[in-house]
Amino acid sequence: MSKNTIGFPPNYRRNFLALLVDYVSFGVALNFANISSVIPAFVGQLTDSAPVIGLASTVFSGGWLLPQLAVARLISDKPRKKPTLLGGMVGRVLFWVIALALWAGLDGRPTAMLILFFVCLGIFAACDGASSVAWFEILSRAIPVKRRARLFGTGQFISGLVGIGVGALVGQILNRRSFPNNYALIFTLTGVAFIPSLVALLLLREPQPEEPNPATGQQARGNPLQPLLDDPDFRRLMGCRLLVGMMGLTTSFYVVHAEDVLRLPQSIIGDFVAAQTIGGVVASIVMSLVSERWGPRYVARLGSAMAMAGPLFALAAHLAGGGRLAQAYPFVYVALGVVNSTWMLGFFNYMLEITPEGMCPAYVGLGNTLMGVQTLVPLAGGWLLEATSYTVLFGITVVLVGAGFLLTLSLRPPQRRATAEQQP
């Protein structure tokens, strides 16, 4: 196959656009069903239990992360990954199932509604997690290393701009409609927002795989823990991701803290969504430039610092008892928006750069499956909150995430990819 752009893979422009539309559509959909604000607030309408509220993030993260190693091993020797990518799209219709249940009045039976919601959320996350292994593999062949930051940054910027309007719309829906119709409409719009993503992925042209390398092929089918055993860069990266991911101890409880302790109105949820989106928009521009200029490890460092800033600010507002710090509480969500931008531009991009040829599914699958331990973090945060206080919860989070930030300072330049990029 001939290249349509000198020095780039076949169908580069078409695939760049398709992946960009997919990225934007997915980001907009998850702005409606925001796992940090909208989802915990919805669960909070059905229960007062902090562990159950934290369970939403646990189910979402666990469903997305845990199946990926098994999926990676299943598809590692398959020449085409697009069927796996498209197969995972079926999980997205489950947001319409949740909406229909709310429209039908299942909220009158809170336990049944919570069970249905958690089952649908878990299946959606598992399907999307399976698709993501194939998505990263196709991305690694369709988009050159030096253009990935541009794709991620542009996608986050556009979805962020649209997300500002989504945040305002969510606030209006929550203000002007009563429960459960307000959340039924929000989840309906979530399902609608996924449609452009499906169309874009259908139009995506998967590049022909490179000639298989027998050595890396054997590694991919061998010990699933091989990257962790052999690659010190991968081990160091996973340590960073696990520690910084401890920010999940508090993520589900910011909105509860704002409403119940700081006495902010429910409409502030729309401001939180907008603040998180604005933080992501600004970060997408800044971090993509940082990634292209200095590399993704510097993005990981900046993101880790902001991950620590969020719970630190919440702790300060809590100790101050509200006041001006309470009015500035959306800063916590600005920090979340910045961190969410740096996961892809920093941590994931760095992982793709240190991954040997032919090992992308193994590295992505193992890396994300190891992050599956994070599924218990929000639940642990709920138990910790009930057993102690917001002061202890926020303080422990700051310490753990701070350790992750210090570890990011030890990330080394990705030598393998740097060498590969110099080859003709």
Image: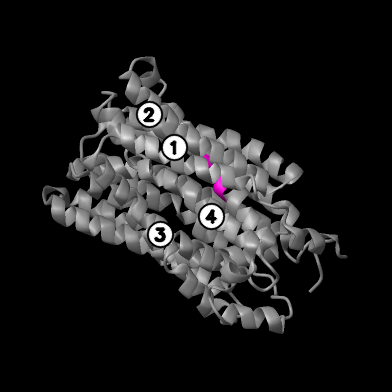
Which is nearer the eye, 64 or 351?
A: 351
Q: Position of residue 12 (x, y in %)?
A: 73, 60
Crowding around mark 3 (Cα neighbors within 10 Å: few <14, some 14 to 19, many 20+) is some
The answer to whether the residues at label 1 and label 4 have Cβ atoms under 8 Å apart is no
Of the image marks 4 and 2, the number of the one nearer the N terminus: 4
Please provide the residue range marked out in magenta: 339-343
Name the residue tied to disc 3: 373
Q: Verify whether residue 265 appears in magenta.
A: no
Lateral position of residue 102 relative to residue 397, left or right: left
Of the image marks 2 and 3, the number of the one nearer the N terminus: 2
Name the residue tied to disc 2: 315
Instruction: Name the residue at the right extreme.
Output: 424
Residue 164 visible from this viewpoint: no
Above or below residue 346? Residue 77 is below
Q: Position of residue 423 (x, y in %)?
A: 86, 64
Residue drawn 15% across and 57% down? 112
Please identify the quadrant where the N terminus is shown: bottom right
Name the residue tied to disc 4: 239
Say what secondary structure mark 4 lies in.
Answer: helix
The answer to whether the residues at label 2 and label 1 have Cβ atoms under 8 Å apart is yes
Q: CA distance from mark 4 to mark 3?
A: 12 Å
Q: At label 1, which amino acid type do we have?
A: Val
Say what secondary structure mark 3 lies in.
Answer: helix
Crowding around mark 1 (Cα neighbors within 10 Å: few <14, some 14 to 19, many 20+) is many
Q: CA distance from mark 3 to mark 1?
A: 19 Å
**Mark number, residue 398:** 1
Residue drawn 38% across and 35% down? 395
Q: Main secondary structure of the magenta part?
A: helix
Q: At label 3, which amino acid type do we have?
A: Val
Please identify the quarter of the rendering in which residue 64 is found: bottom left
